[in-house]
Image (cartoon, rainbow, N blue to C red):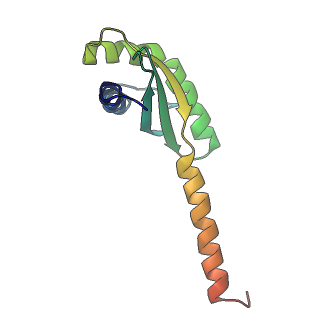
Amino acid sequence: MQGKRTLRVAHLVQMELSRLILSKMRDPRLGFVTVTHVAMSPDLKSARIFYSVMGNEKNKKDSKIALEHARGFLQKQIAMGLKLRYTPKLVFEEDDSLDQGMKVDRVIHEIHRRERDPGS
């Protein structure tokens, strides 16, 4: 389990990254990206950034490339904005939990539809 300081820093990194992606990144490959979660290492030297992208597979792939390309810029901006002793190394991972949730939701709706209309 993460300590309070680790959780606070993770939350700060998440908020700062969200702001940077929204206001500072001008990469045309970047789609509608949402930072869903940040997991910091106990020593605060690395951060796993979980993000989701609205759109098709091409949008997701292009957004991943854009985020990887901007990693250094984002790390520098976080260092300037948060004033931490060590700037965490950013590792981006796509969070597909929203897609999985939508898939489960479609299955549940289909089951309910079949229960209402057993003949179809």
87 is higher (above) or lower (below) than 18 = above
- Depth check, front residue: 46 or 81: 46
Task: Residue 68: tell me if it is visible.
Answer: yes
Q: Is residue 4 left or right of residue 1?
A: left
Task: Residue 63: tell me if it is visible.
Answer: no
Q: Where residue 47 sits: x, y (%)?
A: 45, 22
52 is higher (above) or lower (below) than 103 = above
Q: Residue furthest top?
A: 85
Q: Where residue 100 sits: x, y (%)?
A: 59, 53
Q: Where residue 52 sits: x, y (%)?
A: 50, 41
Q: Where, quadrant-wise, is the C terminus in this rendering?
A: bottom right
Q: Is residue 97 left or right of residue 1?
A: right
Q: Where residue 14 sits: x, y (%)?
A: 36, 31
22 is higher (above) or lower (below) than 69 = below
Residue lying at 58% horizontally and 32% vertically, measured from the top left: 62
Q: Residue 81 appears in which quarter of the rendering?
A: top left
Residue lying at 38% horizontally and 30% vertically, measured from the top left: 21
101 is higher (above) or lower (below) than 11 = below
In this rendering, the count of numbered labels is 0
Q: Residue 115 appears in which quarter of the rendering?
A: bottom right
Q: Residue furthest right?
A: 119
Q: Residue 13 appears in which quarter of the rendering?
A: top left
Residue lying at 42% horizontally and 20% vertically, measured from the top left: 42
Q: Where, quadrant-wise, is the N terminus in this rendering?
A: top left
